[in-house]
Amino acid sequence: DAGVIQSPRHEVTEMGQEVTLRCKPISGHDYLFWYRQTMMRGLELLIYFNNNVPIDDSGMPEDRFSAKMPNASFSTLKIQPSEPRDSAVYFCASTGGGRPYGYTFGSGTRLTVV
Amino acid sequence: QQPVQSPQAVILREGEDAVINCSSSKALYSVHWYRQKHGEAPVFLMILLKGGEQKGHEKISASFNEKKQQSSLYLTASQLSYSGTYFCGTLRGSNYKLTFGKGTLLTVNP
C-alpha cells in the first residue's frame, strides 16, 4: 500500500490567495482526519470525516477554512483567503473503523503564506 | 482537552532507559503513542485501551492507568534510532477525535 498521499509537499503563496491541499487516504480506511502542526500549538485536529461525511469540524479555525470529501479516496482542505498565520504543516491521516487502530499520517504539506 | 506530557525533553546515551508520561484530567477511552522524526510525519507506535493490557514490542512498551488517567511509555536500552519527538494522543469515549499532547523530545547520543 502506498500509504496516505498528500499533495503538494510544499506550498508558498501570497497573502490573500486561495490554497487547496489534497489527500488520498489508504484504501479501505473509512476515517479521514486533517491536522495542523505548529511549534506554538502542536498538533491540532481541524476536522474529521467518517464514510465521507464530516463528523466534527470544531477545530476549523474560522470560515476561511473549508474541507470536503467527495468520495472515499479523496479529500481537500481549502483556505480562502490565506493569511501568514496559516503557515504550518498540514497533515492528513486515515484509519479503519470498527476496531481501535492507529492513525496513518501522510507526509504533510508545508504551507508558507508570505 | 489536551493531555499533558512530561518531561518536555530528555537526553540519553545509547543503551540507557527512559520513561515518558502522559496524563489527562478527563476520563479516557484509549491512549495512542506516536514518534515523529524531524521533517517527517508522526508514526504510530501503539494503542492502549481502557481495560486492556500493557502493550509493547521489542524494547518499547507502554502502560495505561485508568484510575489516574495516565499512560507511560517505556524505552529500554535506547538506540540512536529512538531519537525523535514522542506524542501521546488521547480519545474520550468511542469517538475518533484524537487529541495530542505537546510532545517529548528524545535525543539519544552515542
Image (cartoon, coloured by chain):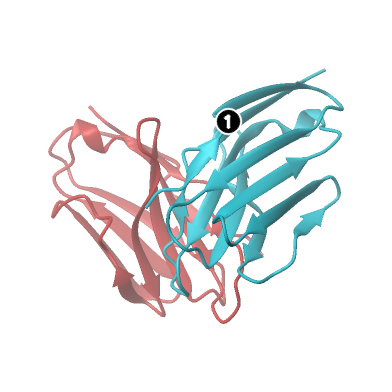
Residue A106 visible, this orientation:
no
Instruction: In the displayed orientation, state which residue is furthest to the front.
Output: B67
Is disc 1 placed on a helix, strand or loop?
Answer: loop
Instruction: Name the subunit of mark 1.
Output: B
Q: Position of residue B29 (x, y in %)?
A: 53, 68
**Colour applied to chain A:** red
Q: Vertically, is A114 above or below A88?
A: above
Q: Vertically, is B63 above or below A55?
A: above
Q: In the picture provided, is B22 more to the left or to the right than B93?
A: right
Residue beneath disc 1: B7
Residue plotted at (43% across, 72% down): B95
**Colour applied to chain B:** cyan
Q: In the picture provided, is B2 more to the left or to the right than A114?
A: right
In the picture, which quadrant includes the N terminus of chain A? Answer: bottom right
Q: Position of residue A50 (x, y in %)?
A: 41, 76
Q: In the picture provided, is B28 more to the left or to the right than A68?
A: right
Q: Position of residue B2 (x, y in %)?
A: 40, 48
In the picture, which quadrant includes the C terminus of chain A? Answer: top left
Residue plotted at (31% across, 72% down): A54
Q: Foreground residue, B29 or A30?
A: B29
Q: Quadrant of residue B40?
A: top right
Q: Foreground residue, B53 or A97?
A: B53
Q: Foreground residue, A106 or B92?
A: B92
Q: Position of residue B11 (x, y in %)?
A: 69, 21
Residue plotted at (54% across, 33% down): B39
Instruction: In the displayed orientation, state which residue is furthest to the top.
Output: B110
Q: Vertically, is B40 above or below B33?
A: above
Q: Amino acid at mark 1?
A: Pro
